[in-house]
Every structure is written in structure tokens, then in C-alpha cells.
């Protein structure tokens, strides 16, 4: 635990974010800048299973490293987000990473375009962080902000487009009435003022998400 101070307390933390039963910390200054640790509920079953992204489904009572599908510590991370059924990371290159998905594993991880969950998984969930893909071989990119509800994910790209994926309970992901998606899709314009869209898709400058809903501040 080299990220701890002389008294054994977690230190050099830039951001802390908590989900339903777990907590994530993005490390700042020093050699571990851009890496992430997590702790809390992680057991099999329930809405928080495998959400810690440490490669296991074991509850953790102290911080552990978040890992990618190859077993390496995630790195170069700039944003963290946690919810009931999924945990999300955004890296400095604009790529999104997810872990968890016990309840809605067929959609919320946004990785079915890779052919499945690959590497480490437990009970249909992904116990490690993997990159989100729009299509086979095409990762979601140019992302500036991430958000997640209980079973839905949102991402805002550098051009102002909002992407949604996961379970569309109450049309939460914004791509059409009750339409689920296992990969990111652009949120549609709907009935918005034309100035807030490109004619087909929503344009925004900030996003958020809640239980079965998504939010956006338009341009």
C-alpha cells in the first residue's frame, strides 16, 4: 500500500466517488497518478456484484487496485463514476471503461461489440474493467464526461453528442422508446428545439444520469 501515508491512511487522492455499496478513489500526485483503488461491496449476486473491478467478486474492507482485463492496474484515468450495477472510468485518451453488470450484463457493460466480456468474469458480470466499444474493433472515443444510472450509462463526446447504452427501462438511455442497447448509441433529438440538436441527435455540454433516466444541459 505505497499510496498510504506514514500512518497507513489513503493519501494523494484527487477524487472520491461512491456507488450503491462501494467507493472508488482516483489517485493524484506521485507515481500512481491516474490509477484507481476501490473498496466495499463486491460479492456475487445483488446489484453491486463485481463492481469494484479488482478481478474478483469478493467484498473488500480496505482499498484494492482496480484492474483491466489483462490483470494490469488501470492507468491514465481522469474521471470515475459508480452506480448500482456498473462502474465507469474515463481515461485521458477519451476512452470509457466499465466493470460490474451482474443484473444487466447483456447490455450495460457496452462491450458486446467485442464478442463478449473476455478475460475475467464472474456470474455473467465483468469483474475487471474493459473498454467500451461502439462496433467490433471501434472503441467509443473522444469522450469528455461519463455518467451512469442504475442500469444505464451515458457519455458526452467532444462534439457535444450524448451516447447511451444499457437497459432502457423507462427509455433511460434516450435512443428510442424502451430500446435496450448493448453498445453505445447517440441519444436522439426527440421533440427538442432545433437549436439543441443537429436535426437528428441531441447536442449538449454536460450530462448526468439517475435511476432509469438521463439528463443533459443543452448547448
Image (cartoon, grey):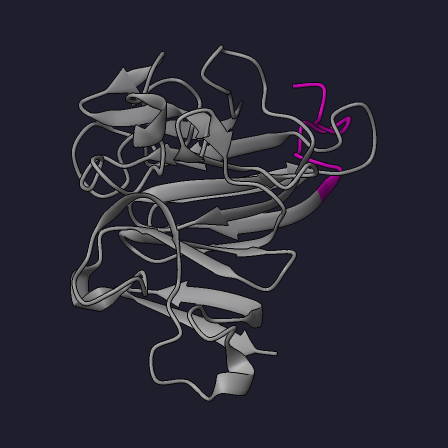
Q: Is 84 displayed left or right of 2 in the figure? A: left
Q: Is 91 displayed left or right of 193 in the figure? A: right
Please tell me which residue lies in front, 160 or 53: 160
* Quarter occupied by residue 47: top left
Dominant secondary structure, magenta: loop
Q: Which residues are magenta?
A: 1-13
Q: Position of residue 174 (x, y in %)?
A: 32, 65
Q: Residue at x 30, y 49 (%)?
A: 84
Q: Residue at x 30, y 30 (%)?
A: 112
Image quadrant for the N terminus?
top right
Please tell me which residue lies in front, 4 or 72: 72
Where is 9 relative to 204, above or below? above
* Quarter occupied by residue 110: top left
Q: Position of residue 176 (x, y in %)?
A: 24, 65
Q: Residue furthest right?
A: 30
Q: Residue at x 34, y 85 (%)?
A: 191
Q: Residue furthest front?
A: 199
Q: Is 162 displayed left or right of 95 in the figure? A: left
Image quadrant for the C terminus?
bottom right
Residue 8 in the magenta stretch? The answer is yes
Q: Position of residue 194 (x, y in %)?
A: 49, 85
Where is 61 relative to 15, above or below? above
Amino acid at each position: 500500500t505505497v499510496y498510504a501515508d506514514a500512518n497507513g491512511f489513503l493519501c494523494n487522492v484527487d477524487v472520491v466517488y461512491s456507488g450503491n455499496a462501494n467507493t472508488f478513489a482516483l489517485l493524484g500526485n506521485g507515481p500512481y497518478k491516474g490509477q484507481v483503488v476501490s473498496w466495499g461491496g463486491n460479492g456475487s449476486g445483488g446489484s453491486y456484484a463485481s463492481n469494484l473491478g479488482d478481478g474478483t467478486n469478493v467484498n473488500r474492507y480496505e482499498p484494492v487496485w482496480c484492474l483491466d482485463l489483462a490483470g494490469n492496474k488501470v492507468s491514465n484515468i481522469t474521471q470515475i463514476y459508480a452506480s448500482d450495477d456498473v462502474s465507469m472510468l474515463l481515461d485521458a485518451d477519451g476512452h470509457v471503461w466499465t466493470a460490474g453488470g451482474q443484473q444487466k450484463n447483456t447490455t450495460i457493460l457496452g462491450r458486446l461489440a467485442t464478442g463478449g466480456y473476455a478475460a475475467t468474469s464472474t456470474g455473467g458480470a465483468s469483474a475487471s474493467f474493459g473498454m467500451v466499444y461502439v462496433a467490433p474493433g471501434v472503441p467509443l472515443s473522444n469522450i469528455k464526461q461519463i455518467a451512469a444510472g442504475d442500469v444505464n450509462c451515458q457519455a458526452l463526446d467532444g462534439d457535444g453528442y450524448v451516447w447511451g447504452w444499457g437497459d432502457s427501462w423507462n427509455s433511460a438511455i434516450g435512443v428510442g422508446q424502451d430500446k435496450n442497447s448493448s453498445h453505445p448509441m447517440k441519444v436522439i433529438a426527440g421533440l427538442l428545439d432545433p437549436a439543441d440538436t443537429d436535426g437528428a441527435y441531441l447536442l449538449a455540454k454536460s450530462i448526468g444520469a439517475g435511476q432509469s433516466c438521463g439528463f443533459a444541459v443543452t448547448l
